[in-house]
């Protein structure tokens, strides 16, 4: 019974944390951005654990931050074709522009490689191509 109670408590804490993060209190925008854009895909976590978020759709772009071992919640705004990457047996050139909520900051209009974004397919159904 203790294990189940501990799991339920952990789930409750996770939901409360996600709610707090989506509330936006104290959120920070990535440099050069102002507000989040509408989203078409949202999940928690949106990013796999230890995923880099970057300034553009490729590994040569600067890393803003890295999600922790729990991943990161957030929303997907759009996608673009960028650098083709193979990692963990998965290959794709799809990069998603996302809003990512980390415990230390919220980043708007940043990029994550498709293999690290929990959307099911690349490109994800219902996600539009990013406009230039």
Image (tube, rainbow, N blue to C red):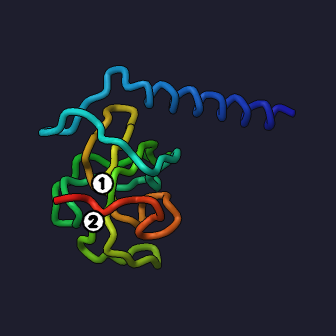
- Quarter of the image where one finds residue 56: bottom left
Q: Identify the residue at horizontal 28%, vertical 40% (top origin).
A: 107
- The correct choice, above or below, for 61 with respect to 87 in the image is above
Q: What residue appears at the point 34 percent right and 32 percent down from the top-left corner?
A: 104
Q: Quadrant of the C terminus?
A: bottom left
Looking at the rendering, which quadrant does residue 78 occupy? bottom left
> x and y percent of residue 18 in the render?
51, 32
Q: Is residue 45 left or right of residue 96?
A: right
Task: Kindly identify the residue that appears in the image at 30 percent across and 63 percent down.
Answer: 129
The residue lying toward the viewer, choosing from 80 and 111, is: 80
Measure the alpha-carbon separation of dots 2 and 1: 8 Å
- How far across and how far down the image is residue 112, in percent? 32, 57
Label 1 environment density (alpha carbons within 10 Å; few <14, some 14–19, many ≥20) = many
Is 122 or 132 nearer to us in this picture?
132
Q: Residues within 10 Å of mark 2 (few under 14, many from 20)?
A: many
Judging by the rendered image, the residue that carries numbered circle 2 is: 80
Kindly state the secondary structure of the residue where label 1 is placed: strand
Name which residue lies at 26% across and 49% down: 110
Using the image, determine if residue 5 lies above or below residue 111.
Answer: above
Position of residue 96 measured from the top left corner of the image (x, y, whole percent): 33, 59
Residue designated by label 1: 97
Q: Nearer the viewer, residue 16 or 32?
A: 32
| The furthest residue to the left | 32
Marks 2,1: beta carbons within 8 A: yes
Residue 80 vs 99, above or below: the answer is below
Left or right, 79 with reference to 124: left
């Amino acid at each position: 019974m203790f294990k189940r109670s501990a799991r339920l408590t952990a789930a409750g804490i996770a939901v409360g944390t996600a709610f707090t993060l989506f509330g936006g209190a104290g959120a920070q925008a990535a440099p050069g951005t102002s507000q989040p854009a509408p989203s078409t895909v949202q999940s928690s976590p949106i990013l796999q654990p230890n995923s880099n978020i970057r300034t553009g759709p490729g590994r040569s772009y600067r890393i803003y931050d890295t999600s922790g071992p729990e991943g990161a919640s957030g929303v997907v705004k759009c996608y673009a074709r960028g650098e083709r990457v193979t990692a963990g047996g998965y290959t794709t050139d799809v990069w998603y522009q996302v809003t990512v909520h980390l415990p230390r900051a919220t980043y708007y209009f940043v990029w994550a490689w498709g293999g690290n974004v929990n959307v099911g397919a690349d490109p994800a159904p219902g996600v539009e191509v990013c406009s230039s």
